[in-house]
Image (spheres, helix red, strand yellow):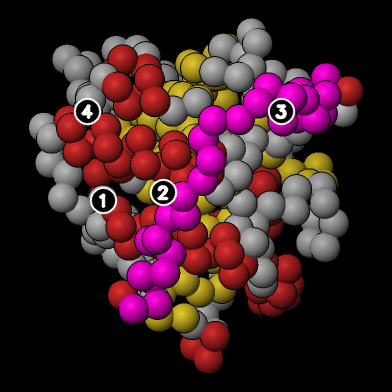
Amino acid sequence: MGIQYGLEEPSEKLVLTPHLLQAYLEIESEQSIRSADEFTKEVLDYYILGEEKQGIKLPWPKLESKFRLRNGECTIIAGINSSGKSLVVGQITLAAMSQQATVLSVSLEMPPRSQLIRMWRQASLSATPDLDFGIEFNSWSRGKLYFFDKEGSIDMDTLEAGIRYSIAHYGVNLITVDSLMTISGIRNDDYTAQKEVVCRLADLSRDLDCHILLVAHARKSMSIKDKIDRFSIRGAGELTDRVDNVLLLQRYYSEDELDPDCWLAVSKARHWDTAECEIDLWLDMASLNVLTEGQKPAKLVMYGQELEEV
């Protein structure tokens, strides 16, 4: 188990032993009751500096002015099996890195090697990225992308300590957790445990001023074509109550090649006015990116802070 850079560099791999993590499980006490005037600067920042426009932009221009991933918030992205949740999370990760975010990927269902194979394809827009691209991506992603190198399951204490460590030592500000059900000790019907985990992640995002993106699964219905909503998310109903934002992803299963392949919904956005919406998305098979109508695939510009349309 360890947190490591985006490509294998054994000499720099860090093994997070229980002794090392213990200090990051000790949460400092803090003063909870404060005067209103202590928050004035934060309110001024919101209105004068345009704080509502800050945060990580998602890869789809239609959402740029509606919704972003802001520090201090927690988001659930949910869908049924094979809806493309992990693929979309990889696309969001690359977009975040291009905006100077530093990302920790906690994927207990897909090893770092498999995640990077797909990210290289999404970033290069090629099904078979060449060696030059790989070398360039390796250099560019160093210090921007870290993996919690563990498969199977993880207990919540270790996950929290790893998040705290990565923020303290690597400056991570976006954490993706794929998925809720891989956190050990949680049964499908243990709604209390599920609620406690989501509450802890939401508290961490707020207390550590980072963004946590949590993948969750939607319940199976009579048909895969049945439209889901945030109440379809598998587990305790309180899961969506506790987080700040809920994104939903679902495939269309149309036989017409011109029809969209899936839709993404901003189903809940607690701190965004009129953000709730749905957008249709088309899958570009060469790059494995999902795009809105008329949107062109964007090749990652290394060492720049933008994605270049091709």
Q: Which residue is depicted at the point 61% across and 51% down?
A: 173
The Cα–Cα distance between marks 1 and 2, rounded to whole angstroms, is 9 Å
Task: Return the x and y of residue 241 as percentages of the image width and height.
Answer: 38, 20
Name which quarter of the figure residue 248 lies in.
top left
Identity of the amino acid at label 3? Phe
Looking at the rendered image, the disc whose residue lies closer to the viewer, 4 or 3, is: 3
| Circle 4 crowding by C-alpha within 10 Å: few under 14, some 14–19, many from 20 | many
The Cα–Cα distance between marks 4 and 1, rounded to whole angstroms, is 13 Å
Identity of the amino acid at label 4? Gly
Please determine whether, in this image, residue 29 is positioned above or below residue 116. above
The Cα–Cα distance between marks 3 and 2, rounded to whole angstroms, is 31 Å
The label on residue 177 is 2
In this view, the residue in front, 262 or 155, is 155
Task: Return the x and y of residue 18 as percentages of the image width and height.
Answer: 31, 75
Q: Which residue is depicted at the point 53% across and 91% down?
A: 11
Task: Return the x and y of residue 212 as percentages of the image width and height.
Answer: 50, 43
